[in-house]
């Protein structure tokens, strides 16, 4: 019996040895492509001066009015109940906007050229908005641009894409009130008061942005 078992074991060993052993080695290349941005979005929101609540304006809104202006009896100046936020961002993929801003004076009932028109009575504040992962943004004021300037001083104001890398540009547009709360209004601005001639003051803000 032992002899038979030994022969069977030997036969099995020889059979196992005779079976071919197959092996393979392959390198797989794994990749993922993030698309490059293909467009620019400009979104306008009206911001409540008291609550800070944002209300998005309809797409394509270009007429930004601070009316109604209300007389503040404490400071004897006219102030609106809102200001505006203009967001400049890229769409279609990854990238940052490279933005240039220029203001041009319009109608000035005061008749003093650009010295006492809307441009010296309004302000623009520049900030970088970085998504915080919770549906909101973290705001960083761009000190290289004031961060707040009179609109009249915006003449080819260039916010490079590197300044807002990883986020987007937000410009707050408001009426000069002389606030000293950071970011303070520029000291060379003027308020709207009863010393101004009644009528509508206007100006235009050209915002040009390209994908980078």
Image: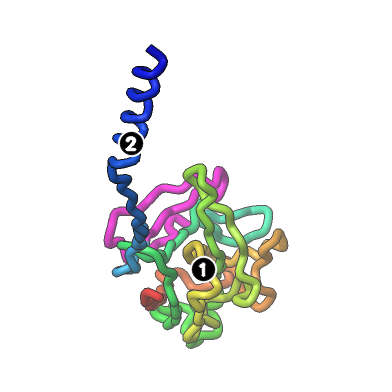
Total tally of numbered discs in the picture: 2
Disc 2 designates what residue?
14
Q: Nearer the viewer, residue 8 or 70?
A: 8
Q: Quadrant of residue 163?
A: bottom right
Q: Name the front one of labels 1 and 2.
A: 2
In the rendering, which numbered label is found on residue 132?
none
Camera sees residue 78:
yes
Indicate whether 85 appears above or below 153: above
Q: Residue at x 51, y 42 (%)?
A: 134
Q: Residue at x 41, y 66 (%)?
A: 88
The region drawn magenta spans 43-69
Question: Residue 91, image x and y in percent?
Answer: 33, 63
- Pick whichever, 1 or 83, lies toward us: 1
Out of 98 and 37, give the one closest to the viewer: 37
201 horizontally vs 179: left or right: left
Magenta-drawn stretch, dominant element (helix, strand or loop): loop
- At a point 44% along the width and 76% down the height, the residue shown is 99
Query: What residue did someone put label 1 on?
Result: 165
Instruction: Check the image and report above or below for 110 versus 7.
Output: below
Q: Earlier in the sequence, mark 1 or mark 2?
A: 2
Quadrant (top left/top right/bottom left/bottom right) for the C terminus = bottom left
Residue at 58% from the left image edge and 67% from the top image edge: 176
Q: Secondary structure at mark 1?
A: loop
Q: Quick check: can you spot residue 63?
A: no
Determine whether 11 is above or below 104 in the image. above
Q: Quadrant of residue 103?
A: bottom left
């Amino acid at each position: 019996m032992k002899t038979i078992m030994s022969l069977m074991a030997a036969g099995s060993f020889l059979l196992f040895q005779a079976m071919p052993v197959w092996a393979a080695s392959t390198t797989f290349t794994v990749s993922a492509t993030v698309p490059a941005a293909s467009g620019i979005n400009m979104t306008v929101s009206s911001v409540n001066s008291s609550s800070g609540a944002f209300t998005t304006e309809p797409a394509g809104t270009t007429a930004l009015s601070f009316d109604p202006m209300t007389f503040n009896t404490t400071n004897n100046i006219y102030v609106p109940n809102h200001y505006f936020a203009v967001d400049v961002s890229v769409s279609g993929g990854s990238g940052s906007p490279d933005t240039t801003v220029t203001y041009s004076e319009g109608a000035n009932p005061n008749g003093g050229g650009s010295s006492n028109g809307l441009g010296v009575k309004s302000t623009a504040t520049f900030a970088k908005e970085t998504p915080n992962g919770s549906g909101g943004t973290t705001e960083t004021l761009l000190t290289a641009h004031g961060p707040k300037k009179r609109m009249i001083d915006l003449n080819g104001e260039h916010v490079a894409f590197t300044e807002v890398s990883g986020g987007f540009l937000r410009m707050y547009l408001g009426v000069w009130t002389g606030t000293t709360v950071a970011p303070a209004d520029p000291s060379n601005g003027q308020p709207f008061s009863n010393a101004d001639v009644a009528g509508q003051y206007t100006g235009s803000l050209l915002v040009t942005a390209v994908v980078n």
